[in-house]
Structures are given as structure tokens and as C-alpha cells.
Amino acid sequence: MDVRVNDLDPWTSLCSAKAAINFDPSINGDFFFEAPVEPTPVRGLVNDNTPWLPRYFAQWTGKSVVVADDVPYLLTAGKEPLKSSILSSTVSTGLLRYGTTYHFRVRLADLTHGGPDATQQALHPAPATVGQCRFHRWVRPKAVRTQTVADTVDPKAVGQIFVWRPRIGYPELLFAGVDPSVIPQLVASAVQAKANNVVLGASDPDVDTLRIIVEARAPAHDATDPDQLDGLYRKIYELDAPFPSILTALPSDPPNPNEAIRVTLGYRDIAGIDAMQAPTGASVLSLPIPRARDVRIRMLAVANNPIADYFGNSAVQEGITVHIDTRSDAGTEANLFNPDPTQLPVEALRAVFLQAVDDAALKLAQQFRLDVNGLTFSGKPGQRVVFGASAALRHSLSGDYSEITFATAHELQLRWIVGITLTLARD
């Protein structure tokens, strides 16, 4: 099996190997040869007894297809696999790259391994002697690495987030163009990485952008179109920020802050999240975050490459999403209450005295513009109402305080019921 990139390039054998002979001084040394790939036909379950060759004979991952790659075993820091021979690959580890079109051909050998070598051309060319394959990147970026710092005003909230590029593992790091010289360094740190539960790899060189999506939890009983929600959350804004340059291919531990995007969260009192705008991208970002709301910050790496037709499709350019939840209740909450423009000023404080009538619950609901079912009161559709009541009225509240149920109808009759209606100036 031979490979080349351009029509004018010489063919490189993928079956070449080297054997180190060390048992007789007269022949000791390195012996270079080609080991063939021998596919074995198998018979199917049908009764025609016809043998079939497998779909593929070998898998090329950048080295020789006839010599096992021991790097994956070494990176696990486990016991080195037993070597059945003293073979080693002579194929360059930097040959296989994403975004490159490769030409392949197959040479046939007899039972004594005799046949044409990689330097010879076909004497009797067939209609299609060379196959072509574009090597795309189908490996999505991994999750970005993050580190959070508590807010100085509200220690329960997140104040800063440091974000680093994700790692890319072996052998994909070689396919993406990482220098092969990092492999011995990775193998040397395998034992310590295993003890610290650290995944070995290099900084993904294709990742150049961090996508940040800021979302707020929608209130219970929110009438927002479900298509505008991501589960329980509604998107406030999103932005893309560029990562700083990679200083070293191998991520350090602790990570280098000069390779991180530093995100600062600025909590603000704001009436509606739709008024918030995304900041411009920079190495130091200040994100406006609404106060007194459950906020979810989603972060994912985005990979780009100037080589055309580099990725398999656009979906593999976006990495795994990382979620960071935060909430800050510290602050003045200025202008929290806002009168309902549909109400008269006197309706903010209203006292009702009901006679002993059969429809006392209905009459009370009409006075306070509520829905009622039996003795259970709730807000109108599209309204988020939170109830509270004095212990002088026997009642029970739902888990999210959106409904109040009175014990009996007598609780509503022949007594003054004073209602305080406050409208929050919040989305």
C-alpha cells in the first residue's frame, strides 16, 4: 500500500518497517523491508458458500499499517504491551494531515513477498489504479477548560471565569498539525496525569474562538413561545471572543493565564433582559448579567481553519458545551416595583368585605383580577403571580407560591380582606 499527495510526488510505502537484528555479529544491524497486508476472506451466513473480502484491509493512522502503534498504550501509564517482534515503523508521523487529499495504490506480492517496490511504476496500467480520498476532520473540539472566581460583592455568585482552549488527544493532535515532538513529553507525564485524573493532550490548534451564550431562567407560568426557550431558559445574548495565541502546545498545570480568556461578570439591576446587549469580543470581557435571576452561561469552543474543505461539515466545528450557573441577589434592586398601567392608583391597596353569599370566592377573584377554581386562586394566563397571606386566614400555598387555597368559604365572608397588589418591574 502506497500513498502520495500530488501526482508528481514519489510514492511512500505504508507497509515499510525496520527490524533491529542483534543476535549474530555478522548480520547485526537494522533490516528494512516491507510486510504485506493479508486480508482473509470470510463466508457469509447465506447458503451460496461464497467467500467475501472484508470492507477494508487495514487502517492508516499516520504510521505504518503493519506495525502496531504503542503510543496509545504508553499514554495510559499502564503496563507496556508485549512486543511480538522487534519491528518499528519507518513512516513519518507527520504525513497524515486534516484537509489534505491523498492518493493511494495497492501493489500485489507473491507468497515469498516478492513483487514490485514503491519506486516502480505499473507496467500495464488499469483504468483506475489510483484511488483518492480527502481526509476531513470529523472530531469535534472537546469542552473548554474553565476556572471560576467568586464575586467580591456576593461570594455566592461567580465573579470571574478563566477559559482555556480544549485539549485534543492522540493521534488527532498530529492530524491537526501539532509538532510530533510533544509525544515524548506526553508519555513522560502519563503517570502523573493518571494520578491526577488529567486527560493528556495538546491545545487544540484549530480552536480560535470562544462562543458565549448568556441565558436566564424563565419565570414559572411564563407565556413565552416555547420555541424561544432552551428548556427552562431564555437566551439573553451571545457573542464570540477570540482566544489568545498558543504559547506552548502542551497545556501547563496550573494553566497559563496568558492563554486564557478572562470573563468578568457585571451584575446589574435591570427591568427586562431584552434590553441587554452583548459586549464586543476581547481578551478581557465584561458580561452584563441581570441580578436576582437564575443565569446560565454556556461556553463552547469553535474551530476554524484557513484550509478549504478542512472539516467534514460545519457541525463538527462546534465543541462540547460547558454550563456555568450563577445568581446574585446582592444589590439595591432600585425601581423594583412599578404600578400596573391598567390599574388605578387606589387598586394597589384594596379592602373587600363580603356578605355570606354562595359565590364569595368568585366575587373576591373579580375584585383582585384573579382566576379561581373552587377555593384556589391563581393569576390570569400569561401572568406570574406570587401569593402571601396572613396566618389569620386559614390557607395553603403551592410549592412555587403561584396558587393560594383557602380552607373554607367562611374564611372569605363577613370579614375585611385587605389586598396589597404590587407589580414588579421585571420581565
Image: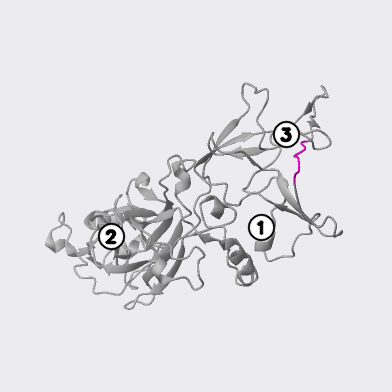
Give the spatial CA distance, label 1 vs label 3: 33 Å
Residue at image coords 26%, 59%: 279
Please give left or right for residue 343 compared with residue 362 in the image.
Answer: left
Instruction: Name the mark nearer the viewer: 2 or 1.
Output: 1
At x 76%, y 36%, the residue is: 39
> Which residue is more in the foreground, 31 or 249?
31
In the rendering, at what x and y percent does residue 309 appear? Answer: 45, 39
Residue on which the image places disc 3: 116
Residue 64 in the image: state x and y as whole percent.
68, 47
Point out the stretch of residues depicted in magenta. Answer: 33-39
Label 2: which secondary element: loop
Which of pointers 2 and 1 lies earlier in the amino acid sequence? 1
For residue 356, the mark is 2
Amino acid type at mark 2: Ala
Residue at point 66%, 57% (across, down): 72
In this rendering, the count of numbered labels is 3
Q: Say which of marks 1 and 3 sits in front.
A: 3
Task: Return the x and y of residue 404 as percentages of the image width and height.
Answer: 36, 61
Q: Main SS type for the magenta part?
A: loop
The C terminus sits in image quarter: bottom left
Q: Is residue 179 left or right of residue 370?
A: right
Q: Mark 3 vs mark 2: give the one in front.
A: 3
Q: Quadrant of residue 285 in the image?
A: bottom left
Residue placed furthest toward the left: 345
Q: Residues within 10 Å of mark 1 (few under 14, many from 20)?
A: few
Q: Which residue is mark 1?
A: 72
Q: Is residue 221 visible?
A: no
Q: Nearer the viewer, residue 91 or 335?
A: 91
Q: Earlier in the sequence, mark 1 or mark 3?
A: 1
Which residue corresponds to the image point at 83% horizontal and 37% vertical from the top-left?
112
